Image (cartoon, rainbow, N blue to C red):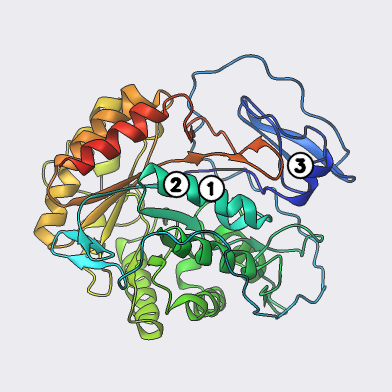
Amino acid sequence: MKSVTSLLLLAGAAAGQQAAYGQCGGIGYSGPSSCVSGYACTSYNPYYYQCVPGTATSAPATTSKTSSSVKTTSTSSSVKTTSTSTVKTSTSSTKTTSSTTAGPTATGFAKTNGLMFEIDGVTKYFAGTNCYWCGFLTANADVDHVFADMAAAGFKVVRVWGFNDVNSIPGSGTVWYQYLSASGSQINTGANGLQRMDYVVSSAAAHGLKLIINFVNNWNDYGGINAYVNAFGGSASTWYTNTAAQAQYQKYIEAVVSRYKTSTAVFAWELANEPRCSGCDASVIYNWAAKTSQYIKSLDSNHMVTIGDEGFGPLTGGDGSYPYQAGAGGYTWVDNLNISTLDFGTLHLYPDSWGQPYSWGDLWVSTHASACVKANKPCILEEYGGTNNCTIENPWQKTALSSKGIAGDMFWQYGDTLPSCNCQTSQDGNTVFYNQGNWDCMVTQHVAAINSS
């Protein structure tokens, strides 16, 4: 997702006020509209208001609908605070366990099988989704509820943010994973840190789901590369070669991988969400991806590794439009696909953000599929979205399912109603809510088509 200034579903919701950095308004939102003391409810788009530091306000009632896309390539939506708190965090690594009914029995680690994936002993095209916020839920019952609904829908793989980087340590009740500072960074293994991810992994296992876990964001949401830049200097483009930033990035990778390297609930490790390098030679991201993926493989030989990129760069059969141009993202996707320590490729699809008609999406999928076949690696249509889900996205789903080389697809993004607050998760304009609205045509019919293929 390009820039998803979005919710942290936190404990304050149940008390009538939204906690720091929680969603407080927007089209379709039904939760608390006022923020805790010291935070103001600020609008980022018609679908999303967030509690950020400032004079407390409430979101106005939203009665109109908008058909405009909220997908942007802006990186100016960061709401991180910048104070340099020295609060010491917990280093406990106690794990919680899910109390839900066990899902399908895991038969081993997910792996590639030719141009497909083998998941729990079955080699078949899969349906999945994105749930960036799953690791930020503070109520175990919410995690279990969401994963139970996903499993019932027929999803096999769920992509979650495995990062939540800050430059100042937030108050209690706010989930954060890593505090970044040149004077000493901290990885939060406490109850409001990686123990939340512990529960996500255990609940995914209980429900027969596999997770793609991502390590950093190209965009500013939940810290991202910008949080490293704030701590260690440089820019988003020099982050890939910044010695101090990369050393801390690898420390964080080691901390996460070491917790879950024996879990069959992990589908794959992902280097970044939509890495780009403006004005860079393509070798910068190539070398970073090769080095980082090799490092992860040295820590964990059980799980697959992928980049998490969008798919930019020249491809045979492309039409020469912006996404196919050299340097569009500062890398050449097809070259990166051939890195030996990467197990599969990813592509994302947002034609409106790239100045293309929605019908262009079929070409994007098919040309990447052909490149995957040539590389002899499976690929995933890992993110895709549009303002009119079914009309726009159903053709892409059909093209992906019928294209050799594409082994699964994961729409952006999943939505649900949380039992802890009886409120809905974030609607960013692309969200498809469980058993509501476009669910049948986007999910039920698509899963049925996969099962019958």
Image disc number at residue 46: none
Q: CA distance from mark 3 to mark 1?
A: 24 Å
Verify CB contact (< 8 Å) between mark 1 and mark 2.
yes
Q: How many discs mark residues in the rendered view?
A: 3
Mark 3: few/some/many CA within 10 Å (<14, 14-19, 20+): many
Q: CA distance from mark 1 to mark 2?
A: 6 Å
Q: Secondary structure at mark 1?
A: helix
Q: Residue 124 sits in which quadrant?
A: bottom left
Residue sitting at x 32%, y 30% = 393
Verify CB contact (< 8 Å) between mark 2 and mark 3.
no
**Would you name the residue on which mark 3 appears?**
51
Up-down relation of residue 142 to residue 392 (above or below): below
Q: Counting residues from the N terminus, which is met first, the one under dot 3 or under dot 1?
A: 3
Q: Quadrant of the C terminus?
A: top left
Q: Is residue 440 toward the left or the right of residue 99 in the image?
A: left
Percent coordinates x, y for residue 184 in the rendering: 71, 79
**Would you name the residue on which mark 1 appears?**
146
Residue found at the far bottom of this picture: 298
Verify CB contact (< 8 Å) between mark 3 and mark 1.
no
Percent coordinates x, y for residue 78 in the rendering: 65, 48
Say which amino acid is labelled 2: Met
Residue sitting at x 25%, y 34% = 396
Q: Secondary structure at mark 2?
A: helix
Q: Is residue 263 toward the left or the right of residue 242 in the image?
A: left
Percent coordinates x, y for residue 324 in the rendering: 24, 43
**Would you name the residue on which mark 2 appears?**
150
Q: Counting residues from the N terminus, which is met first, the one under dot 2 or under dot 3?
A: 3
Say which amino acid is labelled 3: Cys
Q: Nearer the viewer, mark 3 or mark 1?
A: 1
Q: Secondary structure at mark 3?
A: strand
Instruction: Identify which residue, 196 or 52, lies in the foreground.
Output: 196
Instruction: Identify which residue, 10 or 335, lies in the foreground.
Output: 10
